[in-house]
Amino acid sequence: MAKQVFKKPEALKDNIYHYCPGCGHSIIHRLVAEVLGELGIREKTVGVPPAGCAVLAYNYLDVDMGEAPHGRAIAVATGIKRARPDLVVFTYQGDGDIAAIGTAETIHAANRGERLTSIFVNNGVYGMTGGQMAPTTLIGQTTTTTPFGRAPLRDGYPLDLSQMLAVARGSVYIERTAVTSPKNVIKTKKAIKKAFQVQMDNLGFALVEILSQCPTNWKVSPVESCRHVEEEVVKSYPLGVIKDTTPKNK
Amino acid sequence: MTKQLMRGSHVIGEAATRAGCRFYAGYPITPQNELPEYMSRRFGKLDDAIFIQAESEIAAMNMVMGASMTGIRAMTSSSSPGISLKQEAISYMAGMELPAVVVNVMRGGPGLGNIAPSQQDYFQATRGGGHGGYRTIVLAPYSGQELVSLTIKAFDLADAYLSPVVLLGDGLMGQMMEPVVFPEPIDPSKLPKREWILDGAKGRDTRLIASLHLDPIEMEQFNWKLARKYGAICEREPQHESYHLDDAVLGVVAFGTAARIALGAVNRAREAGFKVGLFRPITLWPFPEKELRDLTRTVKHLLVFEMNSGQMVEDVKISVGEQATVDFHGRPGGVISTPHEIANVMTKLIYRYELDSE
């Protein structure tokens, strides 16, 4: 009998993803599931999915999950975590969810140092609703609501939420990664693991911003979408650790 | 049981604590600030209680939602514009079938309104308030002691029906000091365990609390389920109190602070020899329709008095149909009527309908 070298993480359900080909969500779901398994916390974790493409995250992640209104995931997660500090609570949010309609909730949760882990998937558009401009959309980028390209004087500038959150004194660990290559995927997993570890160590607010690709709404091929992240998106959203005030040797 | 003199908003806080509430999130807004202030002090001394001053009304209600998912008894409070902001989350909680208690200390009009005692939010409270056709049970206390009993009842109803419950008061209820007696506190750890809470799927299948039903058939079934629940609430939970109605020729219908004033007016009119009484809905939703209709077997003339420009009067008309005349007297804007004013209105109606000869 052949030796099994690769298997589905326990925290992943046996469902077929509804995500578009080339979408980053499928990879990120899997990474979250792998981390929950490796940290041995699947049975004490509660997740809060967003409104948006990942609204059905509970069809894939096999953990207790509670829905939140659009943008309110971190407030809902705050209620869960404060009521049950023994649980590990995470939110999974897109850029429209966390950086537009949910900006206030997010900044204040970070400022209070809520013991939460936030997975922030930034693909620069509102994917679920059909590709409208997001706060994170690049200057000049064409979307269904910026048909002539995002013009800062009319549409504002790309918002770097992670930098804003880094200013908040209650945030402990913030890193920006991508899922465009095996190397980036491995880095992303490491960051997700650390963001959960920060919560388990009761240190404060942790967030991983993951630059994701949306070939469907960008109207490019999956391969081209990864190239776009690596060559264009990172100019506005550079990869790397944005804040890390965890004690050394962690 | 010792009597203590206490401000209404503090009474709500103490009653909630004794009802086993251990989670409160809120945001400052007048005229209800004394309640979150009380909660911060009271919960600050308890090991198992959480107080959060949220960054917004919206966040406060969503924190309550999250807390409720873990099965803890949770409450928020606010005042009219703040309640509007909370409606999104209240709608979600109705859709997720999550319990919570929401206290609305009503303000005096649309927009910012004012902070004077008013009943401007009857429509909002009794019709659900937000999107999606849900309902919330609405309780309308009219005295300090009833703030105790109805606050506790609000938590019990929220748990029984897995639904947000609104405690609807006004600045007068919140500020007025009255002697009250509290029951012994409930130990929250003794409350029945829930089978639906999110607490990490240890040795069991994972759970989901959500209001999304993409499949129309599934959505339809869920909406019918809610409708059946609301039907059961209308069947079992209407509550009202009657005063001097046995031989009355004219009945005043009023709730909350307005009922308190109306009761004074009824007593005054009785002293003057007029046969008048008071019907006081305690649950505004479910409205005590049947009980009011039954009253019209003997009382053929009703006067609805509200501290708004006429909201509950619609429910009164629906309830009694053609069985009684329905007149309305309102003070919409925070003006507090005197019993004398209401007694005058009653007297006029008695002469208009020629009831003094009966």
Image (cartoon, coloured by chain):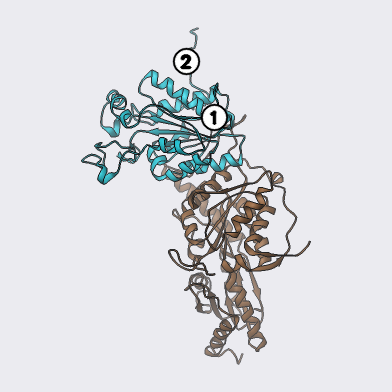
Chain colours: A cyan, B brown
Give left or right: position of A120 versus B152.
Answer: left
Chain of residue at mark 2: A
Farthest residue toward the top?
Answer: A1
Looking at this view, is A167 or B82 the one in front?
A167
Query: Crowding near pointer 1: few (<14 within 10 Å), some, many (20+)?
Result: many
- Residue A30 seen in render: yes
Which amino acid, mark 2?
Phe
The structure residue drawn at horizontal position 66% and vertical position 68%, both measured from the top left corner, is: B177
Please provide percent x and percent y for residue B70.
59, 41
Provide residue B317's location: percent of width, then percent of height. Answer: 50, 73
Q: Quadrant of the C terminus of chain B?
A: bottom right
Residue B329's place in the image compared with B87, above or below, is below
Question: How many angstroms separate mark 2 from mark 1 (CA)?
Answer: 28 Å
Q: Left or right of B175: which side holds B115?
A: left
Residue occupied by mark 1: A198
Residue to which mark 2 is pinned: A6
